[in-house]
Amino acid sequence: MVESKKKQGELQQLLRHIPKVDEFLGWVDQETEAPLRLVKKVVRELLDEVRQAIIGGAEHTRDDLARHHLMPRFERLLASFMQPNFRTVINATGVVVHTNMGRSLLPESAMAGLLAAGSRYSNLEFDLTTGKRGSRYALVEELLCELTGAEAGLVVNNNAAAVMLALDTLAKGQEVIVSRGQLVEIGGSFRIPDVMEKSGARLVEVGATNRTHLHDYEQAISDQTALLLKVHTSNYRMIGFTSEVPLVDLVTLGHEMGLPVMEDLGSGSLIDLSRFGLGREPTVQETVATGADVITFSGDKLLGGPQAGIIVGSKEIIATIKKNPLNRALRIDKFTLAGLEAILRLYLDEQTVVSQVPTLAMLAQEYAVIQRRATRLLRRLKPELAGVCSVFSQDTESMVGGGALPEQTLPSRAVILQPQRMRLSRFEQRLRAAAIPVIGRVENDALLLDMRTVADSEVKELASTVVAVCKE
């Protein structure tokens, strides 16, 4: 009992020695660039953290509550609060179109467009010819038509929105026929059946999971049918005893029955990716050439632009979609328009577009280029990490990513790290917590830094971060 009272008294003494907020503020450098409001918040959080630790039984002395001990903790905490939540990272995963890391990188011309759009007034919805209100879609529609061969087009904020808007316009309260094998789910639990339900369309599944035939569509058509839908299975692939109806045959059936045909291409591409050693995928131009009435695809995946959902097709149907009130809720802003226009203009020159669009450039990188980059990183790391971390390089496989070309890989070279003074999980976590976070991939009890997705300009910074983390 006496011992308990003594401990309680010591606890109260420690709590009384925790500096007051005003006292602590007097310690803070008046030259700090942090706003006073934030400084006060950090001080209160730190002092509360100390208080709760003491109450919880953590070992503390009066010296632990002195300025020379608390100020470094305050400075670290303040620095973490001052750091933006939205940050750049070094993508060393080898996944080119990384959904969780912003997908496609934009070229300099697109970035210049974003700067101009944000820093100056623009003709977003002002017709410079007539001097009257204009349409934001007109700023990119002509380019879309030129590049794809479509009669008309518009852009919304992502491909899920494009699909929902088209279905809501063309099939609300009616039936949409789609192959059972195409009822895909992509990242973030986005499912075609769920989008159809939200649009008000009624799903009619036809065929088996692995095989669907033209007569399956024919037999399902009724007076309630409004649309035939084909969905590109961009994030998975079926092999073996499989078949699906070619789009051109579905278009023929749709036109015979007076029904529009729509294809959701997902990661739409304007160039043949087989030149990079990837599997053959239909381009947007080829899809338009089949006579499909509506085609939807993403702007930020294989196209290599900003996040956007692009809809192209017949002039009559696109005009109807534009009039849908839901279109206003899904429309893109001036930044997306500026970035997308810059990207589309690059595609006008087929000879240079691959080198100009970062996504295409990364996909097209030759193995020798990646190997040289890995060698540069090794030269920086090995002398610094002797006895601290095992470092070597080996061949690996990069992925396209972004729900595109499943199971398709590209030969690459990776730098392999095996820390010797800390657990691999701790090492990986510390790299993610660095000033410029480094994101690799863990394989076979090592961290791989795939150099396909690391820029030449990032090698020095990457090396410095790895060395700093290893020597902490």
Image (tube, helix red, strand yellow):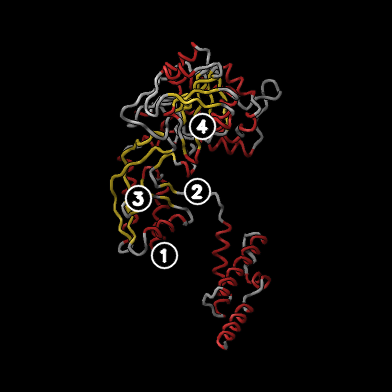
Residue 326 is left or right of residue 289, and the answer is right
Residue at mark 3? 448
Amino acid type, residue under disc 1 in the picture: Glu
164 vs 414: above or below = above
The answer to whether the residues at label 4 and label 1 have Cβ atoms under 8 Å apart is no
Residue at mark 1? 472
**Which numbered tag is attached to residue 75?**
none
Mark pair 3, 2: CA separation? 19 Å
| Tag 3 secondary structure | strand
Callout in the foreground (3, 4)? 4
Residue 412 is left or right of residue 454, and the answer is left
| Tag 1 secondary structure | loop
Amino acid type, residue under disc 3 in the picture: Leu
Decide which of 449, 348 is in the foreground and name it.
Answer: 449
Mark pair 4, 1: CA separation? 50 Å
Residue at x 66%, y 73% (from the top left corner): 20
Residue at mark 2? 88
Residue at mark 4? 193
Residue at x 35%, y 65% (from the top left corner): 421
